[in-house]
Image (spheres, rainbow, N blue to C red):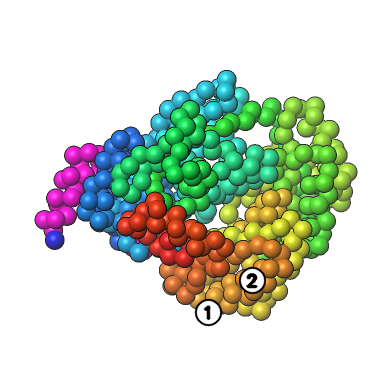
Amino acid sequence: MRAAGDLVLGELSATAAAWPAGEADHVDGVPARLVAAPSTTDEAAAVMRIAAQHGLAVVPRGTGTKLTWGRPPERADLVLDTRRMDRIVEHRAGDLVVHVQAGARLDAVQEHLAPAGQRLGISPVLPPGAGPGTAGGVIATAATGPLRLSHGAVRDLLIGITLVRADGTVAKAGGKVVKNVAGYDLGKLLTGSWGTLGLVTEAVFRLHPLPRAARWVVVGVASAADAHDKVQRVVHSQVVASALELDRPAGDPAALAVLVEGIPEGVDGRVRTLLDLLGGDATAAGEPPAWWCHAPWAAGEVALRLTHEIAGLPRLLDAVDDTARRCGLRAAVRGSAGVGVLHAGIPAVPGAVPAFVARLRELSPSWSGDVVVLDAPPRVKTALDVWGPVRGLTLMRRVKDQFDPARLMAPGRFAGGI
């Protein structure tokens, strides 16, 4: 067995950097055997072909900020580390387009774009202690933050993608090269697939101008109904906010923060409109609140994603409060109330968390949304269906069968055991 492992490592090392996995390479508690770190799409394709020939389960990894999200993979024979694929391939400022490798860190991409007065409109929510993620990671998890209100979801910004399938086949779609596979919109299909359909190696994103001025208006929120009322005032106003975020710490006062961007004169006028619109204790500042772009859970707690229709916000918040009281938990809620994506953090109490999640899922039709457990300690996660009911699961399984019939890409990590 040891000889077979040495043989595979030798083959991998002939194509890309590769080494035996250590404890730091475990994937959500699942031991890994090998790590490979290609620097190009061609190297990644060679690595994937070797993995397929030996029947190795492959788990893609960027900076690892969200590697414990979702279900643990059934096995992780090979961790494919994308951090050496970190180049900005091309920045066509005149076309508002940037082409990057999957391992490019988002903060490095933004630093590169800033001198041209441009930005990538993605502001992911950072888990506790985590640094910026990679372009490939944000595509795999579809995790966007405050700027989704003004710039859309990751899939809306992605105009080209290069993918290596489980058998090592390279596929490209969109961007400057239009060569689709079986009629699929690969960008949309890969976004939020959690590494289960293939390895994203390169991506082309549309860009937006970097605003000359930005200010935040923050106002206190007294109740779920008050939060709903203030959100409705903002989204139905002429202010055109760039972001609209709600923060409800467990046991502390809640607040709503509105980001306004543009030219200085226009921003000043819209801020005055917002202060009048929101009234009360609303204040304006040139810096975001300390909680902006940060997840509401602490290290070791349970992290949830709660989606909702905009009009369903008060029913969701009331349900969280009522369920937390019933289960004896404290729940912190934070997120993009303007687009219907909130996050919640609760203590990892093994007996209470499953009841909390089950109760929220029972109530979720009232706010037309879903409840997903993003992350939790292993002792809690094993007692949960982290994904819960998923619409379109039969179709999702067919797509998985077509892209990865041998189930080699992060098997079991996604909904329904995909």
| Element assignment for label 1 | loop
Question: Which marked residue is nearer to the observer: mark 1 or mark 2?
Answer: 2
Q: Nearer the viewer, residue 235 or 329?
A: 235
Q: Residue furthest left?
A: 3
Instruction: Classify 348 as above or below 32.
Output: below
Q: Earlier in the sequence, mark 1 or mark 2?
A: 1
Looking at the rendered structure, the kind of residue marked 2 is Leu
Q: Quadrant of residue 409?
A: bottom left
Which region shows up in magenta? 2-30
| Residue 222 visible in the current orientation | yes
Which residue carries the number 2 mark? Answer: 360
Residue at point 60%, 44% (across, down): 153
Q: Dividing the picture into quarters, in which one does residue 155 lie?
A: top right
Residue 304, horizontal then vertical, whole percent: 57, 62
Q: Residue at x 26, y 51 (%)?
A: 52
| Residue 178 drawn in magenta | no
Name the amino acid, label 1: Gly
- Residue at 61% from the left image edge and 47% from the top image edge: 145
Residue 164 percent location from the top left of the image:
36, 42
Q: Quadrant of the C terminus?
A: bottom left
Residue projecting furthest to the front: 182
| Relative horizontal placement of residue 27, taking residue 122 as reference (left or right) | left
Q: Residues within 10 Å of mark 1 (few under 14, many from 20)?
A: few
Q: Could you tell me if residue 303 is visible in this image?
A: no
Name the residue tied to disc 1. 351
Q: Residue furthest top?
A: 94
Please tell me whether residue 27 belongs to the stretch shown in magenta: yes
Q: Which residue shows up at 86% across the image and 39% down it? A: 273
Q: Position of residue 2 (x, y in %)?
A: 13, 58
Mark on residue 383? none
Say which element carries label 2.
helix
Q: As drawn, is 22 to the left or to the right of 98?
A: left
